Image: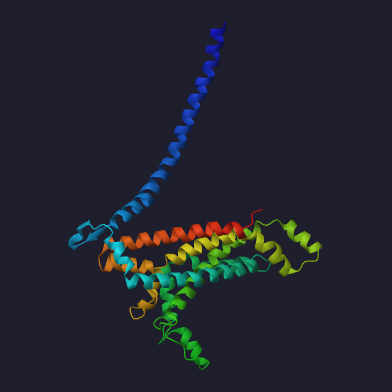
Amino acid sequence: MAVHQELAAAVPRSRKSKLKRREYLWGYGMILPLLLGVGVLFIWPVVRTVYLSFTEWGDFGKYHWAGAHNYVKLASDPEIVRALLHTLLNVVLYVPAIVVQATIVAVLLSQPIRGVSLYRTVYFLPAVMMPAAVAMSWRWLLNGDYGLVNAVLKLFSIQGPSWLTDPRTVLLTVVFVAVWSMVGFQAVILIAGIKGIAPSYYEAASIEGAGPLSKFFGITLPLLTPALFFVSVTSLIGALQVFDLIYMMVGTVAIDNADTVVYLFYKQAFVRNDKGYASAIAVVLFALILLLTALQLKIQRKWVHYE
């Protein structure tokens, strides 16, 4: 009798285990394309780049193992020092500017004003434009000889500078265009964060007699910090990887005053055909992004507030 009971109990268990195995197989089958994509498009290129950073390239695409030669060269290369300084300066100028402007735009476009959908669309349009189109449009507008910006300034008897060739203005100009092109995208993210704040907080604050500024600094800003953190991280990574605007806007005359690490990587890999040294530059940039992102993740515990 006991044997029959054990057999009867074993049958459901075996069926359950088969069902679990099927579920696991289905689950692995569903995530397999994603894992393959991550492996082929991310992990393998990273591993390959690290390997190539220890090689030296010659003519006709031939290369050989060079050990740490490229990293020793990096340590004494004035070009990488200059590119790193320009990259960090771009981060310092770009990230605070876009976070502040996106916050202001998001707060204004979250108000129940007439035509708010149109305003949101207008602000978001630059984000969906091709970077090449943005760069070429602003290159024409900011041309020192026949650009529209200097033509308008001339009407007020103001002599405009050569925005994209003057060493004093070229990097600031690139940062301005970068902020202009992405502020709408980041504002949309912050608008979603503002819409996620419960109206009851504002109702309670109104009962207490709080004004608009008190509501913003006491409710909106603290509860918006998770979205602000996301915007700051993505903006930091974007600022460290800036290339297209510099490549399309800045001429060869002033490129030494605006070249970044990614631009230097491009020049070494595709102009000078030194892919080993370019790979070492890419590894340094990757390490810099990881370091600054990890630093942001650590600091965010002190200022990001979750409900």
Farthest bottom residue?
157
* Quadrant of res 145: bottom left
Q: Position of residue 17 (x, y in %)?
A: 49, 24
> Which residue does the image show at 44% across and 33% down from the upper left?
25
Q: Position of residue 239 (x, y in %)?
A: 46, 67
Farthest top residue?
1
> Which residue does the image show at 36% across and 59% down from the upper left?
283
* 5 vs 56: above or below: above
**154 or 80: nearer the viewer:** 80
Query: Taking 209 as reference, is 241 left or right?
Result: left
Farthest left residue?
59
Query: Taking 74 as reference, is 29 left or right?
Result: right
> Which residue does the image show at 33% across and 72% down from the upper left?
79
* Quadrant of res 98: bottom right
* On-image quarter of the N terminus: top right
Residue 46 in view (yes/no): yes
Q: Position of residue 294 (x, y in %)?
A: 49, 57
Residue 192 in view (yes/no): no
The colouring scheme, among rainbow, by chain, secondary structure or one colour, is rainbow
**66 or 206: nearer the viewer:** 66
**122 or 56: nearer the viewer:** 56
Query: Taking 30 as reference, is 283 left or right?
Result: left
> Which residue does the image show at 74% across and 61% down from the upper left?
202
